[in-house]
Amino acid sequence: MDSWDTFNPTKPTHRKPRRHSTHSHSRHFSTELLDEEVLLAKVDHFLSELERRLDSLEAYGNLKLDEGISRAYTTLLAVRHGCSKISGEGRRRARVIVEVLESSYHDVLEAKDTLPAKVHAGVRFLEELLGDFEAQAHAGADRVIDAKDKLAESIERAIKAARERRLITYEELPFPWRVNPYILRGYRFTETKLECVKSAFTLSNETCNIWTHGLGFMLILAIAFYFYPTSQIFSDHTTADKFINGLFFLAAAKALACSTIWHTFSSISHQTTMERFACVDYSGISMLIAASIMTTEYTAFYVHPISRSIYMGITLVFGIAGVILPWNPVFNKADMRVWRVIFYLTLGATGTIPMFQLIWTRGMMWTMTFYLPIVKSIAVYLSGAFIYAMQVPERWYPGFFDWFGGSHNIWHVCVLGGILFHWNAMQEFFQIAFESVALVPV
């Protein structure tokens, strides 16, 4: 039993004290009461300091903590949270401290037998823990501030160099703008959005990237608003068919426009603005993937409206998520990379799942025949993605492909080619779909 429980002036006593011990007992009572008051006052003072000092540290924003200091921070937060729910009762708050430490740092209190002894040792340990945590947190904050100062200095140097020569080298770029170490020259670095737009009409290492998709955007608009409406297939299509074609054109045009916007404004010297324009590009990619898959689902299940609606609905949900998620700072964190990969793989997988039902209901041969037209589009996309990921050919000849012919240029051509090949495949999809309608018994 804890000494605070055995000594309680509010509890009745069942044993009469002897007369000759009255004075010594009273003095012992006063000493224990004084010790308890001092200890509880120490607890209150520590909790007050804990609240103030944690608030001060948290004012820095997101603290970068390693595993060891993160454990200390979690313990301190648990003490603060547990004690904040108890007001005006010192003993209960002291017990919370002991309970938290016994669960997190059991060995600290293991040698203590009484509650007051545990509280005393616990407060002393927490004071040391808080001091160590503060020291590391301040050091981390100082490193962040130092890194921000260095980044600001590198941005100013890059702006100055760009003012003098218009184009700068890879080594002159601040680190957040460095993407491909094998493209050595021709980088823009502009202070305003208007300068970014103007620079799109001058030669740089982004000229090819901007205009391959800028002109591609115009080509898709021409197909959508002239070639498709004036073709025979337009007359053969139902209103729903035209809507699906329109959805594909919209997604393709959006992806190409978003890519053009990103490469135009990727040189902006404000980091947050630059990263937001990157999100524009991500959202366009998600919509193109989703719309391309939905065209295959629509035609594959042309005479099966329930299955068609289910598959297209699932893909649409993932597509919308792919447009929204890139704007969430959490989604773009470095430690979320695996989850981003899983998400985009899942989005792409929604296009393969219907194949299993088609194989089951229509047979392997019919399914292979149906999907054969899209193989060319997929092959072009994958080839471009592989070249882009490997950073070839500039990896082999750094500096030689600074202006034209680099991996990103090739990737852009492959994306445009993949869109056009998919459009051609869609016409064969619809032809197979129309044949399926003819086979349905009236």
Image: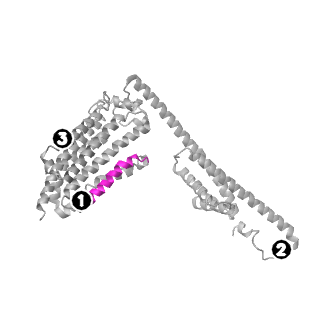
Q: Quadrant of the N terminus?
A: bottom right
* Secondary structure category for the residue under label 1: helix
Q: Is residue 337 left or right of residue 57?
A: left
Q: Which residue is mark 2?
A: 17
Is 160 magenta? The answer is no
Q: Nearer the viewer, residue 194 or 422?
A: 194
Q: Which residue is mark 3?
A: 226
In the figure, 50 relative to 310: above or below?
above
User: Quick one: which residue is furthest to the top in this view?
Assistant: 164
Point out the tag, 2 or 3, that comes first from the N-terminus: 2
Q: Quick check: 12 left or right of 422?
A: right
Mark 3 residue type: Tyr
**Residue 96 position in % (x across, y down):** 63, 61
Distance from Cα at disc 2 to Cα at disc 3? 108 Å
At a point 16% along the width and 55% down the height, the residue shown is 370
Estimate the spatial distance between the alpha carbons at disc 2 and disc 1, rounded to whole Å.
Answer: 90 Å
- Marks 2 & 3, CB-CB < 8 Å contact: no
Q: Quadrant of residue 4?
A: bottom right
Residue in the image at 13% along x and 56% along y: 434
Helix, strand or loop at label 2? It is loop
Please give left or right for residue 120 compared with residue 310 in the image. right
Q: Which residue is mark 1?
A: 308
Asked if residue 181 can be seen in this view, the reply is no
Q: Main secondary structure of the magenta part?
A: helix
Residue 137 seen in the current view: yes
Q: Amino acid at mark 1?
A: Arg
Q: Position of residue 343 (x, y in %)?
A: 35, 52
**The C terminus: image quadrant:** bottom left
Specify whether residue 324 is painted magenta: yes
Q: Nearer the viewer, mark 1 or mark 3?
A: 3
